[in-house]
Image: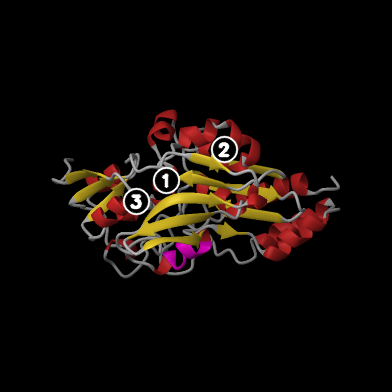
């Protein structure tokens, strides 16, 4: 399958990139590992690709003395996986970046593109008229759905395929968004608000806006944090279910699940609060793992994900218990 004709624009600044992306016919280019595949599948047909990799600061990791950080949108996943400062401060992010795909994909893929990638649902990617592809219904809901969502905020039952996104959710990250109107900051929940109801995409970005950086707060640094991923194959696969957790230095706990939703899925705050209190026995851990999945609505073929998520949660809760 050949690509349709397009022009290439190498952005030299954030303002230049915003201007070039100011029409619906333009698309941002990072590593291209998902974009070019989506173009081959005719899911998107941009007339102009705007390369963000030469924008000043796009490839930089800035670690601030207070524990916060700014990660430019064009930072490679392989860099995040091997960067000593990232591993020391934000271990969950380094582990999640290392879990992405193959070494080749990590070397090419960028953090901005990874967060903005489209779902890997076979109905959507196959060009069938699902909700995200011009139809009115989610074809997976009553079809082949073994890898689909347990939680949805709308019609679509696909899941977000990003590993780093799960870690960033647990670490309370936000994104810097740039467009023709300037730069703003969005929490991840706001970036993906209504993803299951949005027929045109998964983010709330306006035309011309792009993720210019990932921002980590000082509270994300240190503590006990980790990322774990379950896959159908032993390696180089998307997660069936994944989990990122962080016990902050101040004792607060955040837990996020991946492979279960089209948006970053935070575990119920009451579960996190009970974990932060500590002193949990096995029965309490089992009860909390079940409570965390109380609102799950498995489809015909993906009920196994509930058991996988509970298994990951039980392991995480034992590790996060300060009295263990």
Q: Dot 2 lies on which element? A: helix
Query: From the viewer's perspective, is 321 left or right of 255?
Result: right
Q: Residue 94, labelled with which disc?
A: 2
Q: Dot 1 lies on which element? A: loop
Q: Position of residue 20 (x, y in %)?
A: 24, 53
Query: In the image, is residue 257 above or below residue 103?
Result: below
Q: In the rendered image, which quarter contains the N terminus?
A: top left
For the point 40% across and 38% down, the residue is 109
- Over which residues does the magenta segment extend? 189-195
Query: From the viewer's perspective, is 27 left or right of 212?
Result: left
Q: Verify CB contact (< 8 Å) between mark 1 and mark 3.
A: no
Mark 1 to mark 3 CA distance (whole Å)? 11 Å
Instruction: For marks 1 and 3, give the one nearer the viewer.
Output: 3
For the point 30% across and 55% down, the residue is 18
Q: Is residue 236 visible?
A: no
Query: Of marks 2 and 3, which one's residue comes earlier in the chain?
Result: 3
Q: In the rendered image, which quarter contains the C terminus?
A: top right
Residues 258 and 6: in front is: 6
Decide: few, some or many residues near mark 2? Use Cα within 10 Å; few <14, some 14-19, many ≥20. many
Query: From the viewer's perspective, is 302 left or right of 274?
Result: left
Q: How many numbered badges does the structure rendering display?
A: 3
For the point 72% across and 65% down, the residue is 270
Q: Dot 3 lies on which element? A: helix
Q: Residue 73, labelled with which disc?
A: 1
Q: Position of residue 202 (x, y in %)?
A: 40, 60
Instruction: For marks 2 and 3, give the one nearer the viewer.
Output: 3
């Amino acid at each position: 399958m050949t690509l349709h004709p397009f022009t290439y624009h190498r952005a030299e600044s954030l303002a230049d990139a915003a201007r070039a992306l100011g029409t619906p016919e333009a698309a941002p280019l990072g590593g291209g590992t998902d974009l070019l595949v989506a173009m081959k599948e005719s899911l998107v047909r941009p007339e102009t690709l705007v390369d963000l990799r030469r924008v000043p600061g796009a490839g930089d990791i800035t670690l601030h003395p207070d524990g916060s950080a700014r990660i430019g949108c064009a930072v490679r996943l392989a860099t995040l996986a091997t960067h000593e400062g990232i591993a020391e401060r934000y271990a969950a992010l380094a582990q999640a970046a290392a879990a992405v795909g193959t070494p080749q994909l990590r070397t090419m893929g960028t953090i901005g593109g990874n967060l903005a990638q489209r779902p890997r649902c076979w109905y959507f990617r196959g060009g069938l008229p699902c909700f995200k592809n011009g139809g009115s219904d989610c074809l997976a809901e009553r079809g082949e759905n073994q890898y689909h969502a347990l939680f949805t905020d709308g019609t679509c039952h696909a899941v977000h395929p990003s590993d780093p996104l799960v870690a960033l959710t647990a670490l309370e990250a936000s994104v810097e968004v740039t467009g023709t109107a300037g730069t703003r900051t969005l929490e991840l929940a706001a970036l993906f608000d209504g993803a299951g109801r949005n027929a045109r995409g998964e983010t709330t970005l306006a035309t011309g806006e792009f993720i210019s950086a990932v921002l980590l707060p000082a509270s994300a640094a240190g503590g006990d944090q980790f990322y774990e991923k379950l896959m159908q194959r032993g390696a180089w696969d998307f997660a069936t279910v994944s989990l990122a957790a962080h016990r902050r230095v101040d004792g607060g706990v955040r837990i996020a699940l991946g492979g279960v939703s089209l948006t970053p899925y935070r575990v119920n705050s009451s579960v996190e609060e009970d974990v932060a209190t500590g002193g949990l026995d096995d029965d309490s851990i089992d009860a909390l793992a079940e409570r965390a999945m109380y609102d799950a609505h498995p489809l015909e073929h993906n009920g196994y994900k509930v058991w996988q998520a509970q298994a990951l949660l039980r392991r995480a809760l034992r590790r996060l218990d300060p009295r263990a």
